[in-house]
Structure formats: structure tokens, C-alpha cells
Amino acid sequence: MSRPAAVLLSQGDEVLTGQTVDTNAAWLAERLTDIGFDVVRHFSVGDRLDDLVAVTRESLSLGDVVICTGGLGPTQDDLTSEAAAAVLGCELALDEAELAHIHGLHRAFKMKMAPSNEKQAWLPSAATPMRNDWGTAPGFRLEHTDAVGYFVPGVPREMRSFWEHRIRPDLIERFHLHPERLTVLRCLGIHESRLATILAPFEALEGVTLGFRTKLPENQVKLRFHPDMSLEDQQAVVDRAHAAIGKSVFGIDTGPVEAVIRDLLDERGQTVSTAESCTGGGIAAALTSVPGSSRVFVEGACVYANEAKTRTCQVDPELLEEVGAVSESVARQLALGMQARTGTTYAIGTTGIAGPGGGSLEKPVGTVHVALAGPRGVHHRKLSLRGDRERIIRLTIGSALDTLRRELQGLLPPP
Amino acid sequence: MSRPAAVLLSQGDEVLTGQTVDTNAAWLAERLTDIGFDVVRHFSVGDRLDDLVAVTRESLSLGDVVICTGGLGPTQDDLTSEAAAAVLGCELALDEAELAHIHGLHRAFKMKMAPSNEKQAWLPSAATPMRNDWGTAPGFRLEHTDAVGYFVPGVPREMRSFWEHRIRPDLIERFHLHPERLTVLRCLGIHESRLATILAPFEALEGVTLGFRTKLPENQVKLRFHPDMSLEDQQAVVDRAHAAIGKSVFGIDTGPVEAVIRDLLDERGQTVSTAESCTGGGIAAALTSVPGSSRVFVEGACVYANEAKTRTCQVDPELLEEVGAVSESVARQLALGMQARTGTTYAIGTTGIAGPGGGSLEKPVGTVHVALAGPRGVHHRKLSLRGDRERIIRLTIGSALDTLRRELQGLLPPP
């Protein structure tokens, strides 16, 4: 059975000239795919009326559903409503209810309403307004040549609320969708191509659609199930996929690894600290990026200079002299020294060469040592990474977090 | 004089389904605009041949130049060459020179060449190959209906090299461009809308094109000059813009603020350390994100728990009890304590409530204190930020870095 076709349209000179990267399109495309649409095209177009009319018309003729973001602001170059009216062959009309709503918002926030804000309440008379409960610009919905079009503001926060509360429910009803159940297996420490190989047999399963998403260093596996499939059968497929991938799965339908680590530490009353050299505070920043991290994260040290390694983590200065800062023994001393200093259950130590300078034949750029001190002793991993400075730092952060979560999940052999 | 029109075409299911965010389009759009093109459309299209043919044809009819990224890989669903051949009405032909090059690359890297890699050397016979010195997939150039099309791999690193070494020089010659000189004023601590107001009079200047680019917390002002404008006149405009914006300009045609700070500290033989609470190591991570930072960055502390603030920065436990961790006096003690501990010229301290929990009526979420200890004493800033946790952390990092660079550039009054 073929899936209905969706087209995305991003409007605005700032997208077209590369002033902003269009993240709305990818966000919407993922969600449209998840509920059963086939996204067939994205368009980006600037602030010229004739271009906008042409692309709006083309979008509505290509797709069963069109979502257009942007161009609903109060300024002269916000022409989306005008273009939609031209396509529908109708006038712009002042929508009194939406105007009252905009006035009300300004009163509620004690802001003076600029005359230009009234423009936002002029909508195509043949369209149906969609109330914006998250900002001033109303959206609208229209029907044309067997397609339905949703026109919403480009501000990501508002666009996402429109999707959640207006567009998604309407699409499900309109297209009689039974959104397939979606399960996401979140993985660390495994390459995308390896995942694809392992899961190739799942491609052939009846009622199961397999998808992948990479956000370095994480890889996600998405399993979508046809609504006719029983929950037991769905669970069996999830279990088989989990078993096939193995220990690289850090969570199923969970938050990011930082949240998984926070929860595991929190429920055991355990804590963590960090002593970072090459990652420069990035592991601490990651661990504290999730709310509630203060319950489990005690202290981080970014010991860049050798003197700092000694001062804060008691790394032996003679050892630094002898084997160099980038070595297994220094990584171990960083972790153990930080653990002793803070009294945390776990401590992470990193040292490495992120480049572009500082490499040698023995220790090329990308040589990294990660140590994790914990109740069972010290785990150590040596990494040989390729890529630029940013990538090496990011992969090291991922590897350190992955080592901690594997230890917390009981997946590592004793050190 | 109207500028020639450019169209961007991104090919691949991973872009269309939102598996990856398309950053190539924005990157190319910015550079095409910079050298004098008017980007009129982006298209994204998936791995279906008929869609690809239709969009390739439409792109070439809309633009004077088309750049297509992606779909040149070795797999079955890489159909860009086939689509281009269909548009040109020619066959795919094996290009012996490109095949030999691909073979050579595999030999050089001691990799076994998969039979599928040969597919990459089959190019439209009416197109001109473009050698890929940065990967295996050759690009190609074609001419059709008065337009020129460049087809390059979607891997960002390879795409960027193709732009720099193949496409940009060819466009400059082909369109007789005299790329306008571009000067970028990099700003921190000023809002985009304020910049637009200040610089509004510059919109009217003959031979000057004004552009903006925001990458939170930085705002960039781009001044493009017509080649006929004398260098003296250009410089006068830059100077006037700089004077109008004032101290918020941290650099003109420089690297990011972290690099500006690194260079200023380095040339004076000065150093910096950090004691972070709410920013969780993010300032240390920013300062160490640029190469060579080890010359000026000594040590960072992420003192999340109160005990850590006392242990590492000698923050008075009674003070913590009395005024709370989120206060001006604690921020000052963090900076001074870290400066005393490390002996660095400067030390930054941050404490605040990043949310979503932890706020109160007196100290709502977004309340942040930043302190900078230096040779002239301690500068303090209290911030009241809005937005989610990530935004509050990012804006605090920006504000702390901006305080340090303003002090280094002699722009702050004595504390």
C-alpha cells in the first residue's frame, strides 16, 4: 500500500541565503515519516511573491499534504498569506477573532502592539485559521487540488507546537492513519554500517519498517510496527533486535545517554566526577546538560596544564616527565586522583592529542586514553581516532560516557 | 544590475526523511551569495530516478548555475549520474581516467576496491568530469539550456573542497565575476535587531551590500563592496560601521572569540582558568576548542556541588549557607579562589540557575552571576536570561567570554 506524499516548503530569504540552517524541514520530515507519510520533496524559497506563488502551487500539486514554515511575520517581506491567497484565488481578509487574540496577547504581556502586528490577522479568506497559542502569528490550513496545506510560523518552538497540537492530530484523522508504533533503540560504541549489516534480516520482516538515524557519536535504530501486528509480536522483534545488536544498546525509548547515566546513578545514590585533559570540560558539560544532574555530578576538573594535573589529581610529576601526559598511566592517575579528591563513586579521566598540532610518530593526533575509576577498579580504553579536532573531542566524550554507562549497566568484565 | 540566479539541489533519502539535517545547502548558499549570485531555490529530493530527473531539469531551467550535492556514491540508490544523463539525453560512459584514479586511491590507502566502486567512474558522456582529490567519487560539470550544473559528493568535507578548488574558480571565470570584497564584523553582547537599527543607514550606501548572520550568542555583520569602490572608501565604511556598533565588535575578519582571546593572552604571556557552576564546563570546553589553547588555558573547575566550590575555590561555606550558591559574592569567590589556586592572570567564575527546576521568586530560572578576576580586580555581571536550559547555558558562556575579551581589549571601565 503506497503511503501518502508529503511536501515541505521553507520560506524566507534567511534560509535561502544560508543565514540560518533550515532545521525545521528535517524535524518535520522525520515526524511525517514516522506517522506514515512519504516525504517526496523539500523546497526553500525566498521573499519574492511570484516565486512563492509558483512553489506553493507546485507543492500542492505534488503532495497530498504540504507543510509550509515561515513568512507569517509582521514585516513587508512576509508574504506567505498573500501567496496562498493567490493560489486559492481568494482575497486576504481580516480575521476578527485572530486579531482579538493578538491584541489579548499583547495586553497579557504588557507589550505595546505595533500597527504592523495587525497584518498577521489578514488571512486568505478561503483558508481556515489555526490558533497560535505559543506566539502572535496565526497559522492557517487550506485545501486545494486534493491536497491539504498547513501554513505555520518558522520559529522552531512555535512550529513544533503547531505540529503537535494542530497538524499531527488533523492528519491522523484526515488520512485515517493508525500511526505505527515506533520503538527507538539508542546505541553507542557501534558503527552505523555494522548496525545496517546486523539488522539486514529485519528488512524482510512483514509489518516492520527499519530506519536509522546518526547523531555522532550515537546511532539510533528505529523500528516501526504496522498497527495490525500484535504487541507480543512487536516486543519479540524488539527483543531480537536488541539481542542482535547486544551491549551497544544503551536504552530503548529512553532519553540521551547522559539522562540514562543520571538515572542509574541517582537510583543507587551514586556520584561521578571528571578529570579531563583533551576533552577540555566537554564530559562535564555533557553530564550537566540534563536537568537534575546536580544530584549525581559533584565536580569536574579540566586539567589542561601538567601542573594542574599534579595539583588537582596528584598525577606524579616524574611519571608525566617519563611517559608523557598522553599515556595510560596518566589517564589512570587522573581518574583515581579525582575519585580520591571528591569521594565520588566513579571518576572519569581523559588525556589525548586532539590536534591539529602536537602529534608524533609514536603518538599521532587522535591518540586518546580514557580511564574510569569505580568500585571495581579502573577500566582503561585506548582510542586511535581520525578526523579534525572537534570530531576527536566529540568521539572521546562519547567513548567516556559509553564506558561509564556500560559499567553501570553491568556490561563490562572486571578490570 | 541583476545578479545571476543560483539553484541548490540536495539529493538523498537521508536528507528527505530528516535522518540528516542538510547543512550543505546553507553553506553553499552563503558562499554563492558572497561572490555575487542570487540564490533563488533549494530543492531536496530522494532516491527515486523520475523525481531526480524532474528536479534536475527544473533546477537547470530556473538557475544560471545549479549545484547538486549527493547521490554519487557506489550503491544502487545513488542515481545522480543517471538522472543527469537522462536530462542531457546522453549515455553513461566509463571514464577510464577517473577509474584509474579510483584504483590508485585504493592502492595508496591499501584498501581493497569493491566492484561497486567502479560504478562511480560511469559518468554522463556529455558531462565534463571533475577530479575528486579528497575522496573516491568524481564530480562532473554539465551545460544545459544556458545553465551550468556542478554535481559533487554530499560528504561535507569533499563538497567544500570541490567548491573551493573547482566550482568557485570556474564560476568566477565563467560569469566574469569580480568577487566583491567581503568584510565581516564579529559581534558579541548586542542583539540582532539592535544591529539592524544601527546599520539601517548603511543600506542606502552605493556599492555596499549589508548582510547579517546570527550564531547564538554571536552576531555577524557582513559588508560586501562593489569592486569599483576604492580600498580607501571601503575602509572608511568599515570604520564607520565599527564606530556605529562600538565595543560589541570583538573582531574584524578574525576567527571566533575563543581564538581572539587565545591570541590576546598569548601575545602578552598571560593565562586563564575557569571555575564554573551552571555552565558545567562549557567555558573550558569553548576556550579549549581552538588549537593552541594549551598555551594560555591552565585549568578549569566545574564545581557543581557546594562542597566542590569550597574544596577547590575556597568559597566560604557560611556564605553559601547565608546568600546561596547563586549570588554575586559566590561568583566573585569562585573567580578569586581559582585565580589564587592556579596563579593565572585571569579567572572566570559562573553560578546560576539553568533550569528547568531550581528557580524561585527571588531567583527565577535564568538568574546568573558571572565574575572575572584579573589584574585590575573583579568584574561582575548579573544576567536575567530567558529560554530553555541549553539556551541559558549557551548565553552565559557567551557573556563570560565576552567579558574576558572586553577586558583584554581595554573596553571595560575599572571594576
Image (spheres, coloured by chain):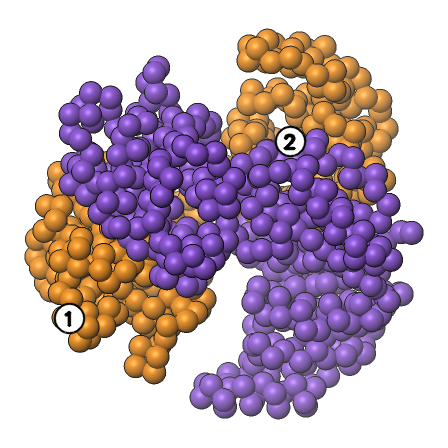
Chain colours: A purple, B orange
Which sits in the foreground, A158 or B142?
A158
Residue B332 in percent (x, y) is at 16, 63
The answer to whether residue B129 is above or below residue A72 is: above
**Res. B368 image quadrant:** bottom left
Q: Label 1: which residue? A: B319
Give, as a three-letter code, the residue at label 1: Leu
Q: Position of residue B285 (x, y in %)?
A: 33, 46
Q: Secondary structure at mark 1?
A: helix
Decide which of A246, A95 is in the foreground and name it.
A246
Quadrant where the image shows the C terminus of chain A: top left
Q: Chain of mark 1?
A: B
Residue A195 sits in quarter: top right
Identify which amino acid the numbered label 2 is placed on. Arg
Q: CA distance from mark 2 to mark 1?
A: 54 Å
Residue lying at 24% horizontally and 45% vertically, measured from the top left: A340
- Crowd class of label 2 (few under 14; some 14 to 19; many from 20; radius 10 Å): few
The residue positioned 78% from the left and 61% from the top of the image is A179
Write the residue at 79% across / 67% down: A171
> Relative to residue A164, is residue A272 depicted above or below?
above
Q: State the SS at label 2.
A: helix
* Rendered residue at 47%/54% (across/down): A264
Q: Which chain contains the residue that carries disc 2?
A: A
Does any portion of residue A302 appear in the rendered image? Answer: no
Numbered circle sitting on residue A194: 2
Q: Is residue B401 left or right of residue A229?
A: left
Q: Position of residue A329 (x, y in %)?
A: 28, 28
Determine if residue B274 is in view. Answer: yes
Q: Position of residue B14 (x, y in %)?
A: 69, 43
* Count of number-bearing discs: 2
| Left-right relation of A74 to B180 | right
**In front here: A409 or A158?**
A409
**Up-down relation of residue B248 to residue B292 (above or below):** below
